Image (spheres, rainbow, N blue to C red):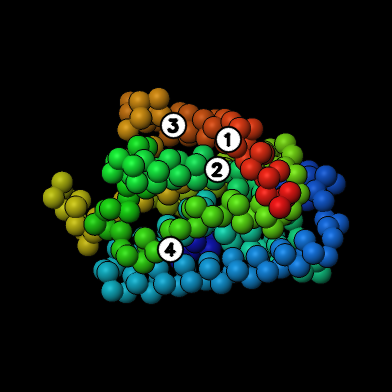
Amino acid sequence: MLTLIIHYSIAITSTFYVHDTFFSTTSSTQDDESTIERQSYISKFLFIYTLILFTTRYISSYFAGRLRHYSVLYELTWLCNFTLAVGCTTFCGASSLWFFRRRPLVATACCIAISIDQVMWYVDLLGFILTRQWLIGVMKYLTWKQTLWIDRLTCLHHLWTIPVIFYGANASLTWDSVKLSAFIVIINVLLSRWLTPHCIQIGITDDKNKKDPLHYRYLNVNLAHELWQDITLPFLQISKDEPGCLVYLFRLIWRWILLNTLIYISILYPLNEWIISL
């Protein structure tokens, strides 16, 4: 619980501070009434969905062992869940309160920050439908023994978060969103490396116990400790040689930001232009 509170407190407030300091003059806050009303509805929807996601996963932990209870709180700090919370907050529109001030640029920056992961979800989903195989492996965790049915039910936001937030922002993407997304990636990865363990376990764990979620649970939130264990594509391997902490984080962060930038140019910018034209 302390990890969850510290992670969100630092990540959100620092992101808002960077936005207000360096990007507030270029971030449009004078939208028409229809856009403000749209953002208000989306903010309420994201709040309800996020509340359901948080509470159902947390309540389910009471019936799945002590490690599940801990892992749920750690896993809520994944960047995709962070984006839901930030989208809700930045579309709220309570301008009298600094924390709830409208910041659509922050919401779109979060979408760019998670874009490589979300695109991989589409690739994995399409690949599984056509070939019954996970082409990349980002969705394979849904078949793990430690993954409950409620996790599978509340993972669908990976497929709709970006288009919903783009629809709410209702503005052309700019390079400011890309720049801010780089900060969002960095701060979340560093916080996860600091606060969240690679895994949690009870007692001494061997290969047999690792398959039992009552004794061992894999975390690796925001890939802060290693490349996700189900991803086997050769060109993505950055932790196979077991590099030191700083070397690994450097490899991860610059690749993550580069891939997000390529996704922004090739997919997100055209997608957003199409969405705002609707």
Foreground disc of the pair 3, 2: 2
Residue 261 visible? The answer is no
| Mark 3 or 2, nearer chain start | 2
Sequence-wise first label, 4 or 3: 4
User: Of helix, strand and loop, which one carries label 4?
Assistant: loop
Circle 3 sits in a helix, a strand or a loop, which is it?
helix
Q: Which mark is residue 236?
A: none
Residue where numbered disc 3 is placed: 248
Of callouts 1 and 4, the N-terminal one: 4
The residue lying toward the viewer, choosing from 226 and 47, is 47
Front-lying residue, 29 or 38 = 38
Earlier in the chain: of badge 2 and badge 4, it is 2
Q: Secondary structure at mark 2?
A: helix
Rendered residue at 28%/74% (across/down): 63
Q: Are marks 2 and 1 in contact (CB under 8 Å)?
A: yes
Residue to which mark 4 is pinned: 154
